[in-house]
Amino acid sequence: MLYRRCPDISPLSEEPIDTPEMVEAAAAVARDEADVRMLQRMAELGMELLEEIAQSAKSSLRAAPAGAEGAAPNAGPEPTALFNKMAQTVRRTIALKRSLGEAVKTGRSELATKREKRGDWIMDAQVQTMDECIETTFCESLGEDYAEPEGPETESLRRDMREVLSDGDEFQDYLERPVGETVAKLRAAMGLDAAPCVLDGKIWRVRRGPYAFEAAKMATAGEPVWPCAAANPSAASPAAAATGPPG
C-alpha cells in the first residue's frame, strides 16, 4: 500500500492551556477572592455596629444625670471601650482584606504569566510538529531520493517548502488545516502534480513515491509508475484531485 494516512493533529485552539498545577492555582485564587468578598462584608457589618454603638453612646451620655460619677455595677461595658474594641476589629478586618487582596493580585499575575508562557510553548510545539509532519509527508510523496531526512536534496527541498509556507495568503492558516490538504497545496504551488493527495471521506491520504524496487516491480508487471515528482504546472486543484485513492 503506497498511501500514507496523514495523522490528525489537533488545531491550536483545541489544546488546553491550563496544566493540573495551573488549575489548582486558579482554584486557590478563586477561593481567596471569595474570602476577600467575605472580609469586605465583615468590614461593612462592623461599620454598621460601630455606628449603632456610637449612637447608643451618645444617647447614654445625654441621658446621664449632671455631675454623675462612675456607673452602676450592672450598667454593662463603658460605651467608648466597646466602640474602641469594635473599631480595632474593623481595622484588623480591613488590614487582612488588604493583605489577602494583594495575594490575590499576585496570584492572578503569576497565573496569567504561566498561561502566556504555556500558550507560547503550545504554539511552538504544535508548529514544529505540524511542520515536521508536512515536510515528511511532502518528501515521501516525491519518492526514495527524498526519503532520507538528512540528505542534501531533502534539506534543499525543505528550505523551499518553508519559504512557500511562510509567503502568501494561501498558507497563512495552514496550521489549522489538515496535513494532506496543505501538502496538496504545496505540491501545486511548487509546480508539482497535486494528484497524489486524496481525500478519502474525512481522511487525507498522500501517496508516497515508489522506491526503486517498487518501481521496477510495477514496470515488470506493466503497471504505470506514479509520476510523483514530475512537474505539472497545469495540475488540477487539490479539491478536484480529492476523489479518494484509486480502486
Image: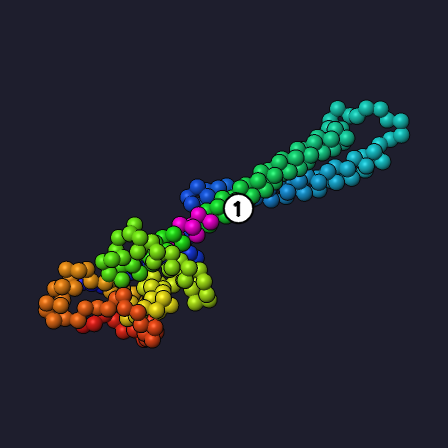
- Which residue occupies 29% across, 52% down? 151
Horizontal relation, residue 107 to residue 180: left or right: right
Q: Residue 189 placed where, x, y %?
A: 38, 68
Q: Residue 160 placed where, x, y %?
A: 38, 59
Q: Nearer the viewer, residue 202 or 207?
A: 207
Chain part drawn in magenta: 120-126
Dominant SS in magenta: helix
Horizontal relation, residue 170 to residue 85: left or right: left
Q: How is the image coloured?
A: rainbow
Q: Nearer the viewer, residue 103 or 58?
A: 103
- Which residue occupies 47% across, 49% down? 120
Q: Residue 195 placed where, x, y %?
A: 28, 71
User: Quick check: 180 above or below 58?
Assistant: below
In the image, farthest residue toward the left:
221
- Which residue occupies 14% across, 71% down? 223
For residue 175, say whether it is visible: no
* Disc 1 target residue: 112
User: Quick check: 197 above or below 112?
Assistant: below
Asked whether residue 122 is drawn in magenta, I would say yes
Horizontal relation, residue 188 to residue 21: left or right: left
Secondary structure, mark 1, is helix
- Which residue occupies 34% across, 61% down? 179
Asked whether residue 187 is drawn in magenta, I would say no
Q: Are there few (<14), some (14-19), or many (20+) residues within 10 Å of tag 1?
A: some
